Amino acid sequence: MRLYLAGPDVFLPRAAEIGARKRAICAQHGIEGLFPLDVELEAEGAAEPIYRGNLALMESADGGVFNLTPFRGASADVGTAFELGFLAARGKLIFGYTSDPSPYRERVHAQFGPLVPGREAWRDRNGHAVENFGLPDNLMIAVSIAEASFGIHAIAEEGPDALAALRAFESCVAQIAARVVRRHSQERAHV
C-alpha cells in the first residue's frame, strides 16, 4: 500500500529528516510512504513543478495520511486541506492525526477570542460564527476523515518536533496497518 504523507512537515527546518523518519515508520508497518519532498524537481523553486509533482505522487498513492496539527492558525495547513480534499474526491483512503487534541472551538477562542454565544452560534471577536461541534478541526476535514476511516488520531506533543506529530503519526500508521493494509492486500490478491 502506498500512502501520501501530507502535512506542514515540509516547512520544518529538518523537513527531509522528518520525512525519512515517517517513511521508515510506514515501512515498519508494510506501507510505502510518499513524502511531498520526494518529488524530483527540474526547476528548483518554481511553484508549478512542485504542484504537478505532488499531484502525481497523490495519483500514484492508494490514499493519504494527513498531519492536521494546526499550522499558522487554528486549523490544519491549507495545502494539507487541499490535498485531503483532492484524495477524498478521488475516492482514495484518507487518515488524519494531530499533536493538538484540543477541540477546534477552543483553538479559535485562544487565537480569535473572546468567543461569545450568539442566538444561533458562538461568535469570535469579529462577530464571525465559530463551529461548535466538539471536533478536532473544521467539520469538512473532521467528518470526511471520520466517514472514510477511523477518525483523527490526537496525541498531545510538545517540543521542537510537536508540529511533526510523530507519536500521533505512528499510532495512526499502526492502526492503518492493523485495520486496512491487511484487508487491502487481501482484496488485491483476489483480483
Image (cartoon, rainbow, N blue to C red):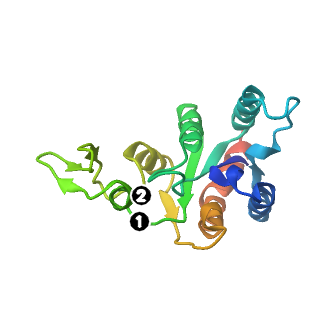
User: Which circle's residue, 2 or 1, is located before the other in the chain?
Assistant: 1
Residue of label 1? 102
Question: Label 1 is placed on what type of residue?
Answer: Ser
Front residue of 43/142: it is 43
Residue 12 coordinates in the image, percent (x, y) = 70, 56
Residue 39 coordinates in the image, percent (x, y) = 81, 39
Left or right: 70 in relation to 30: left
Residue 183 coordinates in the image, percent (x, y) = 64, 53
Query: Which residue occupies 44% across, 53% down?
Result: 74
Residue 84 coordinates in the image, percent (x, y) = 56, 41
Query: Which residue occupies 78% across, 65% down?
Result: 28
Question: Label 2 is placed on what type of residue?
Answer: Pro
Residue of label 2? 136
Left or right: 21 in relation to 96: right
Q: Are marks 2 and 1 in contact (CB under 8 Å)?
A: yes
For the C terminus, the quadrant is top right
Left or right: 28 in relation to 66: right
Q: Residue furthest front?
A: 126
Q: Secondary structure at mark 1?
A: loop
Left or right: 62 in relation to 46: left
Query: Which residue occupies 78% across, 45% down?
Result: 37
Quadrant position of residue 120 = top left
Against 78, residue 101 (above or below) is below
Against 17, residue 10 (above or below) is above
Quadrant position of residue 40 = top right
